[in-house]
Amino acid sequence: MNRRRFLGSLAAAGVAGGAVSSQSWVHAVLPGRPWGEGRPLRVQVLMFDGVEEQDWAGPFEVLGLAASLGAPLECRLITAGRPGRVASAYGAQLDVDLGWSPAQVDLLVVPGSRYADPKQPGVHQLIGDPAVMRNLRDVHDQGVVMAGVCTGVMVLSGAGLTRGRPCTTHHGAKEDLAAQGGSVVDARVVDDGDLVTAGGITSGLDLGLWLIEREFGTRLAAEAESALEYERRGTVWRG
């Protein structure tokens, strides 16, 4: 059965078609999670000059949609320092009103950009900033789940967070990821618990949908996928 027919069967059962109340997703939070009982899952997407538009917009769209469908989730854009304007890779400019906020996050998404050109604004500026690398290590040590999209995974690698861990990234950076100690897996999304990584650019959509499924269950993920009119690609590898 292909995915569209599968989603159709869910719709017939009253899931993907919206017959189930969005409030039911509150009760679908997996056991052991602190969110869903008094507070939402707090997701932040790290923004920086040169960030690839699709890298951040894909997961932000998916997670925002999940919240609109009733999931106890909030998704915010943040910077690595003070709030301010961010100029994306292809010209989109955004005023990001939240600076680095390690006390307000459960899951941090790091998008990528311009890995092939270290002279351009992008991931290399983050990797070369000792304060950013230290902050990423600190929030991970505090129990924050780290998620990387495309060459945003190389930022996590620069902080030492992928060393000895199953992970993936854009195909053009996999060799470097392995050379830096990552155990590279040939999958669209690699879930190793508190480290979740995704391949290149559009893989951010699949990352977002997987995170919804992982935290809130398959029914909400299926409804979100149907609303987006997007069919997930590739494999999710789980540790």
Image (cartoon, rainbow, N blue to C red):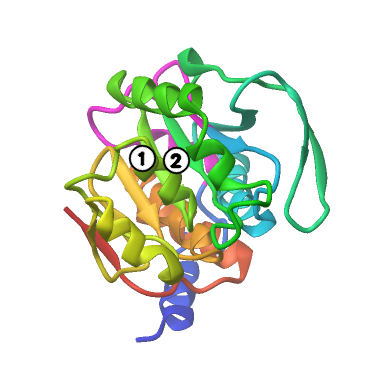
Name the one closer to the observer, 66 or 190: 190
Element class at badge 2: helix
Is residue 80 positioned above or below 204 on the image? above
Q: Which of the 4 quarters of the picture holds residue 145?
A: top left
Q: Residue at x 80, y 39 (%)?
A: 94
Asked if residue 205 lies in the magenta stretch, the reply is no
Is residue 11 positioned above or below 94 on the image? below
User: Mark 2 highlights which residue?
Assistant: 25
User: Mark 1 highlights which residue?
Assistant: 28
The amino acid type, in three-letter code, at marker 1 is Ala
Residue 138 as seen in the image, left or right of residue 4: left
The reply to whether dot 1 and dot 2 touch (C-beta < 8 Å) is yes
Q: Residue at x 41, y 44 (%)?
A: 147
The amino acid type, in three-letter code, at marker 2 is Trp
Is residue 126 positioned above or below 63 on the image? above
Element class at badge 1: helix
Q: Residue at x 50, y 51 (%)?
A: 20
- Residue placed furthest toward the front: 119
Near mark 1 (Cα within 10 A), the count class, few <14, some 14-19 or many ≥20, is some
Residue 163: where, in percent of width, then height?
22, 44
Give the residues drawn in magenta, as a range: 21-43
Residue 33: where, in percent of width, then height?
30, 28
Q: CA distance from mark 1 to mark 2?
A: 5 Å
Residue 9 makes an appearance in the image: yes
Name the one closer to the observer, 18 or 107: 107
